[in-house]
């Protein structure tokens, strides 16, 4: 005759039921399918694998018109022309340059020789930016005493 404690012990050592194992396998399969689906969806979005392209890469690509690009470059000195909110400037990656136009407000850090990332469309000649981000200086420089 089994006592209550020996009955509990035999129950603890018993292998998991087939029903419990099936629930675990189905749950793991659902989680795995969800993760794979989300990664596949994210990777299929345009521009998802590269944050931006260089000016040279932009000019090497065929103008798409409707496709949005993010292009990175340095503002060429003396190229900034402002007419209200309308601004035209040129950026370069050291090998090529492109004219950028925008009617959006520009960040305070935007100036000659600042590094920028512009988002917008390229028609083969001019880049029409809907957003311009300027990289902030990464090093603090104290004013020199004269």
Image (cartoon, rainbow, N blue to C red):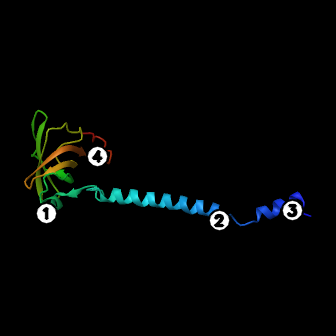
Q: Is residue 101 above or below residue 40?
A: above
Whichever of callouts 4 and 2 sits on the residue coming sooner in the sequence is 2
Q: Identify the residue at horizontal 90%, vertical 60% (top origin).
A: 3
Real-space CA distance between mark 3 and mark 2, rounded to the nearest whole angstrom = 23 Å
Q: Secondary structure at mark 4?
A: loop
Quarter of the rendering containing residue 27: bottom right
For the residues labelled 4 and 3, the Cα–Cα distance comes to 72 Å
Front of the two marks 3 and 1: 3
Task: Tell me the quarter of the picture where residue 61 sits.
Answer: bottom left
For this orientation, the residue located farthest to the right is: 1
At a point 18% along the width and 52% down the height, the residue shown is 74
CA neighbours of label 2 inside 10 A, class few (<14), some (14 to 19), many (20+): few
Lower position in the chain sequence, tag 4 or tag 3: 3
- The quarter of the rendered structure image containing the C terminus is top left
Q: CA distance from mark 3 to mark 1?
A: 77 Å
Q: Residue 60 shows which numbered tag?
A: 1
Q: Which mark is residue 137?
A: 4
Residue 50: x %, y % from top left = 28, 58
* Sequence-wise first label, 3 or 1: 3
Q: Nearer the viewer, residue 36 or 46?
A: 36
Give the label on residue 18, or none: 2
Query: Which is nearer the N-term, disc 3 or disc 2?
Result: 3
**Label 4: few (<14), some or many (≥20) within 10 Å?**
few
Which of 140/75 is in front? 75
Do callouts 3 and 1 mark residues in contact (Cβ within 8 Å)?
A: no
Q: Which residue is mark 3?
A: 6
Image location of residue 105, percent across then percent down = 19, 36
How crowded is the residue under tag 3: few (<14 C-alpha within 10 Å), some, or many (20+)? few
Mark closest to the chain's N terminus, 2 or 1: 2
Instruction: Using the image as rendered, state which of residue 108 and residue 3 is in the foreground.
Output: 3
Q: Nearer the viewer, mark 4 or mark 2?
A: 2
């Amino acid at each position: 005759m089994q006592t209550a404690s020996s009955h509990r012990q035999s129950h603890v050592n018993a292998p998991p039921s087939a029903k419990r194992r099936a629930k675990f396998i189905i749950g793991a399969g659902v989680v795995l399918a969800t993760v794979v689906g989300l990664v596949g969806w994210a990777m299929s979005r345009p521009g998802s694998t590269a944050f931006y392209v260089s000016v040279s890469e932009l000019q090497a690509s065929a103008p798409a018109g409707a496709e949005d690009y993010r292009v990175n470059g340095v503002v060429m000195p003396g190229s900034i022309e402002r007419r209200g909110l309308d601004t035209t400037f040129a950026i370069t990656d050291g090998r090529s340059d492109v004219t950028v136009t925008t009617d959006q407000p520009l960040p305070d850090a935007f100036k000659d020789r600042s590094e920028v990332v512009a988002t917008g469309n390229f028609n083969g000649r001019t880049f029409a930016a809907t957003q311009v981000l300027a990289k902030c200086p990464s090093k603090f420089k104290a004013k020199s005493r004269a």
